[in-house]
Image (spheres, rainbow, N blue to C red):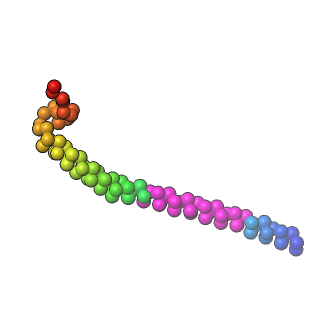
Amino acid sequence: MPSSHLSLDETSSTALSYDSDEEYELAQKEWEESLNQLQQLVGVVLLPFFGKWLGRRWSHIVYARYLRVGLSKALFFGESSKT
């Protein structure tokens, strides 16, 4: 009878480690899903929003420079000093 008691303890400890491994794998899968969702959020929402903002900002800067120096090489390469 004592030998059967030991075998039950061994199987329960094996089952506990198996559950622990399953929990770890489940947590790992959930973590990877969360990272995938975060990457999709950045790629679909944040990058286009940032690109739109940056494009509008740049167009205002270029347009202000165009009004100041006109359409010439100075627009792209800066004002040349004529002395």
Q: Position of residue 42 (x, y in %)?
A: 38, 55
Give the magenta-colored segment's residue range.
14-37
The residue nearer to you, when weighing 53 against 46, is: 53
Hey, which quadrant is residue 82 in on the image? Answer: top left
Q: Which residue lies at the image location 17% right of the left edge and 45% below the top edge?
A: 64
Quadrant the C terminus occupies: top left
Is residue 66 magenta-colored? no
Q: Is residue 54 left or right of residue 82?
A: right
Q: Position of residue 46 (x, y in %)?
A: 34, 56
Magenta-drawn stretch, dominant element (helix, strand or loop): helix
Residue 48 visible in image: no
Residue that sits furthest to the top in the current view: 83
Q: Which residue lies at the image location 65% right of the left edge and 66% below the top edge?
A: 19
Hey, which quadrant is residue 68 in on the image? Answer: top left
Is residue 26 magenta-colored? yes
Q: Is residue 28 left or right of residue 68?
A: right
